[in-house]
Image (spheres, grey):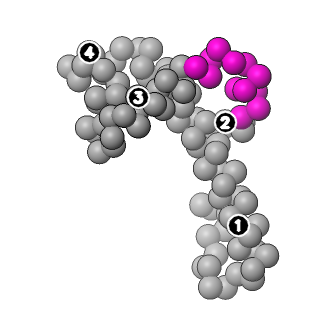
Amino acid sequence: MEILGERPVWSMSDSEQLATLDALNAEISRLQTYRLQVLASYDASGHAATLGAGDTARLLAFRHRLDPGVIKRDLALAKALRKYPAVTDALPPVHP
């Protein structure tokens, strides 16, 4: 959170807290967009099956202790985004 300054919350005014929440939300959106891109690419690689995990959803559910249904939903969204360039273009830019 270097970009956001990591100031203690107690030292911020109300307007500074609101600005920080805006910045945090933008960063979360950027990271979620990047996550979907990596998720779709990883699934397409077939690496999870190579590891013996069966599929990407099963591997990530186990590895990250997430609900497999959530992973499957995110994976479906990640794959669908490729079909809709207008939506993809509207997502925040990803610069890892």
**Separation of marks 2 and 4 at Cα, in angstroms:** 28 Å
Q: What amino acid is found at the position of numbered circle 3 in the picture?
A: Lys
**Mark carried by residue 20:** 1
Query: How many angstroms separate mark 1 from mark 2 (CA)?
Result: 20 Å
Q: Which residue is mark 3?
A: 72
Image side of residue 75 versus residue 7, left or right: left
Residue stretch in magenta: 80-91
Query: Within the image, what quadrant is residue 51 found in?
Result: top left
Q: Earlier in the sequence, mark 3 or mark 4?
A: 4
Circle 1: residue type: Thr
Q: Can the viewer see residue 3 in this picture?
A: no
Element under disc 4? helix
Q: Can you give x and y, in whole percent of width and height, for residue 53 in the image?
A: 23, 23
**Number of residues whose C-alpha sits closer than 10 Å to that of mark 3, classed few (under 14), some (14–19) or many (20 or more):** some
The residue that appears at 54% across and 31% down in the rendered structure is: 36
Q: From mark 1 to mark 4, how far is it between C-alphas?
A: 42 Å
Please tell me the numbered disc located at residue 50.
4
Q: Main secondary structure of the magenta part?
A: helix
